[in-house]
Structures are given as C-alpha cells and as structure tokens.
Image (cartoon, rainbow, N blue to C red):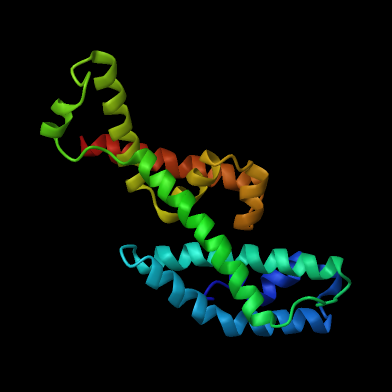
Amino acid sequence: MSNPESSPEWVVSSSSAETNGHPLNKELIAVASRLWPRVQIHARRELTNWNPDDSVALATEVWEGVLQSVSKTLQRRKGSTAGIVDLDAYLFGVFLHRFNRALKRERRRQEMIELVPSGLDLEQLPGARDLKSAHDLERSIQVKEAIESMDEWTRKVFAARVYGYSWKEIAELQGLSVQKAKLRFGNALRKLADRLRYRK
C-alpha cells in the first residue's frame, strides 16, 4: 500500500493501540501484507472499466475497514482465533463480502446520476417539455458534470456525505481534524465552481 496510512501496520495499530505489540497483531499484519496484492488484482479484475487507481482506491478503503474490524473482533476475544481455521481465507472472504457490498452501493449511486445520452432521447420522455421536468433535468446534468469534475478526494468526501457519514467520521477516515476536512472540502468546491463558471 503506497500510502503509509493505508499500510496494515498503521491500520491495525490505529484500531488496537493498546495491544500493538501483541503476537496476534503481528500475524494479522503479516497476513494482510501477503494478501494485499491479491486484493488489488481482484479489484482490477472486477472493475475492468474503471481507472486502475480508482479501483485500487475502493479496494484500499474496503481492505482498511476489514482489517480494523477483524483487529477489533480479535481484541474483544482476547486474541483467541477459535473458529478461524485459516486467517488468510477468512480475511479474504470478509474482503470479498464487503467489496461486493461496496460495488452494489457504487452501482446504485451511478444509476441515480446516470442521464439520458442525447437530446433526441430526451424528447421521447413523457413530460420532457414540462418546465419543471426541464429544470430538474438541467439541474441533474449540472450535478453530474460537477461530480465528474471533482478530484478523487473531493468526490470521495462528497459520496460519504451523500451516504450519511458525519464530518467526524470523514475526518477520521482521512486522518484530518473535522475543521481541516470541512475547510479542504469547501475550498475544493469553490475552485470547482470557479472552473465550471469559466467553462461556460
């Protein structure tokens, strides 16, 4: 994992600071490091029509959640792996389950903002000439254009807000204070608005 804050060591230690030196955490880190290339390959294979960086970013987000969750679960069990025969298979299985859920959410989000491709098709829609429908359609086109113009960080934070994440949760995921996360997001939106304004 290129970002040090995405490495298994950082993820596991941040979710279990008081047992950081525990042998089980070392085992979890070793397994996570060993599985990371397989996780990336799976994400790229599943998302062939995505930018490779975006597919790895989604995989990273899901993988971090898996490591934090498993680390906390093992902590609660006082380090007992009873019931886990193969930690590699267990971790990868949890990843697959969560990755598929994340893909479903992403597909639903894409369907929500997907638009009709051409003006001719628009005329076929019932009520396309209705003023309110035209206004709503124009608005959704502007929203789609704005989302597509966002940089990856801004798009990720925007999606998190749409899905109901609090600023505190977003800030923790990004390793920032709430104030800095809000400030960075606000600045990004202002720059985006300026860019879109000048494009017209």
Which residue: 24% across, 14% down? 131
The correct choice, above or below, for 118 with respect to 46 in the image is above
Which residue: 38% across, 39% down? 112
Q: Is residue 189 left or right of residue 18?
A: left
Identify the image quadrant of the N terminus: bottom right
* Percent coordinates x, y for residue 143 in the rendering: 35, 35
Q: Is residue 153 visible?
A: no
* Percent coordinates x, y for residue 150 in the rendering: 38, 48
Q: In the rendered image, which quarter is residue 63 located in?
A: bottom right
Which residue: 36% across, 43% down? 111
Marker count (numbered): 0
Q: Nearer the viewer, residue 43 or 56?
A: 43
* Percent coordinates x, y for residue 155 in the rendering: 44, 49
Q: In the rendered image, which quarter is residue 3 located in?
A: bottom right
Identify the image quadrant of the C terminus: top left
Which residue: 27% across, 38% down? 115
